[in-house]
């Protein structure tokens, strides 16, 4: 039986970052109660539809869920517990902005046991360019505040920013590695279609690093993290120990099940032997109305074909260092992967095969999507 996680999407932010393509809206002081009630009702309806299944993780993402007060977070945790039940050691993660550090104590008291602090940079000029409201000093204080609660702490940083040198990134990362955190999520800046950054690139007002520099930055990341005892267990994620790994994100990478609630949330649930893909209404008002009218907030419910399921398992499974079972992929597909392509990728030291599993090498991780396309062709 697949493990189950719960993802709650809180769509509001105090400001919209120019690189963000998530389903987010500017917080304008509206009453949170209607959306909190809709999320609670959606959880209950999905439990009735798919059956009560104990969740090993609860992830409050967004958006900026750290805008929520402790009592509101407690309400969401209680709703998840009533609908599905949470494992005794359930990982309860809160994506947190540094400017909300004054709320960390009450959020921890409400049940949060893992803070994911979105520092994004330790350079004030870079933070302004990224549209962030905090400065580097606030990021450092936020990490210390999260650690002081006694809960687990993860730190997010973005690199491969415009004008960033390898030396500057090394200095920034070395500073992060001295902080009281046990997990690092280190993302190369991606220019997503439809974002403010994409429009700036189109107008030649923003020039991201080229492929060669991006590769150098990636290699520097791996070198420094490994030397500091933070090896990569996934393309962009580093843990001080196996216990520090994100349990919730591991559900995605392992293609387990997760219940998605909140505006724009996605879910994947195995039901009656079929993988079902769910997507919620995007606009908060539409989501609230959908829950009132239908019990759930979905805009689409799609039964994935075996081929689609296999492609997802391959794409997500190759992201982690352990890779994915070849037999699992081929059983789902009902056909072999492209064995000629697999042999060539192994010869090029982009893919490794061992004990029935295939995984990406460090070089291969820079070409994940292309490799998946080759194998699935």
Image (cartoon, rainbow, N blue to C red):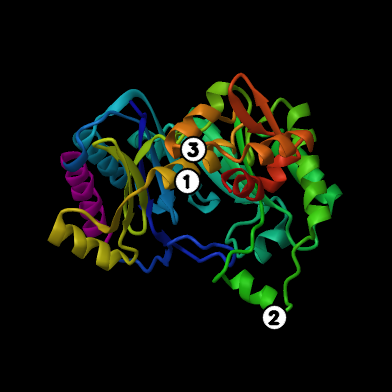
Q: Secondary structure at mark 1?
A: strand
Relative to the observer, which residue lies in front, 1 or 327? 327
Q: Secondary structure at mark 3?
A: loop
Structural crowding at the residue carrying mark 3, measured as other residues with C-alpha within 10 Å and reported as few (<14), some (14–19) or many (≥20): few
Residue name at image x 22 percent, y 49 percent: 42
* 70 relative position to 377: left or right: left
Q: Which mark is residue 53?
A: none
For the N terminus, the quadrant is top left
User: For residue 35: magenta?
Assistant: yes
Q: Which residue is mark 1?
A: 95
User: For residue 187: magenta?
Assistant: no
Q: Position of residue 217 (x, y in %)?
A: 79, 47
Point out the frontmost of discs 3 and 1: 3
Residue name at image x 71 percent, y 25 percent: 229
The relative height of residue 162 versus residue 105 in the rendered view (above or below) is below
Q: Secondary structure at mark 2?
A: loop
Q: Is residue 158 visible?
A: yes
Residue name at image x 22 percent, y 59 percent: 34
Q: Earlier in the sequence, mark 3 or mark 1?
A: 1
Point out the frontmost of discs 3 and 2: 3
Relative to the observer, which residue lies in front, 315 or 60? 315
Residue name at image x 70 percent, y 50 percent: 122
Q: Which mark is residue 335?
A: 3
Point out the frontmost of discs 1 and 2: 2
Q: Main secondary structure of the magenta part?
A: helix
Q: Earlier in the sequence, mark 3 or mark 2?
A: 2
What range of the chain is rendered magenta? Answer: 31-48
Q: Farthest residue toward the bottom?
A: 203
Relative to the observer, which residue lies in front, 273 or 254? 273
Q: Is residue 175 visible?
A: no
Q: Position of residue 325 (x, y in %)?
A: 53, 27
Q: Which mark is residue 203?
A: 2
């Amino acid at each position: 039986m697949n493990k189950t996680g719960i993802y709650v999407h809180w769509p509001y932010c105090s400001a919209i970052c120019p690189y963000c393509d998530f389903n987010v809206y500017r917080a304008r002081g509206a009453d949170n109660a209607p959306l909190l009630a809709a999320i609670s009702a959606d959880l209950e309806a999905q439990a009735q539809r798919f059956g009560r299944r104990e969740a090993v993780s609860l992830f409050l993402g967004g958006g900026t869920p750290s805008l929520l007060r402790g009592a509101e977070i407690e309400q969401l945790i209680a709703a998840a517990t009533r609908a599905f039940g949470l494992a005794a050691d359930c990982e309860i993660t809160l994506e947190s902005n540094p400017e909300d550090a004054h709320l960390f104590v009450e959020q921890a008291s409400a049940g949060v046991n893992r803070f994911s602090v979105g520092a994004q940079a330790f350079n004030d000029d870079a933070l302004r360019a990224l549209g962030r409201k905090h400065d580097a000093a606030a990021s450092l204080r936020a990490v210390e505040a999260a650690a002081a609660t006694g809960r687990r702490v993860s730190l997010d940083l973005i690199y491969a920013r415009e004008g960033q040198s390898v030396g500057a990134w090394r200095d920034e990362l070395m500073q992060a590695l001295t902080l009281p955190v046990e997990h690092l999520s280190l993302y190369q800046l991606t220019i997503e279609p439809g974002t403010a950054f994409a429009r700036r690139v189109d107008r030649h007002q923003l020039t991201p690093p080229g492929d060669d520099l991006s590769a150098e930055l990636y290699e520097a990341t791996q070198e420094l993290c490994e030397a500091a005892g933070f090896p990569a267990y996934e393309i962009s994620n580093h843990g001080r120990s196996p216990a520090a790994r994100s349990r919730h994100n591991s559900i995605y990478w392992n293609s387990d099940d997760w219940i998605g609630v909140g505006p724009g949330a996605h879910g994947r649930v195995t039901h009656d032997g079929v993988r079902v893909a769910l997507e919620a209404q995007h606009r908060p008002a539409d989501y609230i109305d959908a829950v009132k009218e239908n019990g759930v907030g979905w805009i689409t419910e799609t039964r994935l074909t075996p081929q689609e399921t296999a492609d997802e398992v391959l794409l997500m499974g190759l992201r982690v260092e352990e890779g994915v079972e070849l037999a699992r992929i081929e059983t789902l597909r009902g056909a072999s992967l492209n064995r000629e392509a697999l042999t060539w990728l192994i010869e090029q030291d982009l893919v490794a095969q061992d004990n029935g599993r295939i995984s990406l090498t460090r070089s291969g991780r820079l070409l994940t999507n292309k490799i998946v396309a080759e194998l699935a062709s």
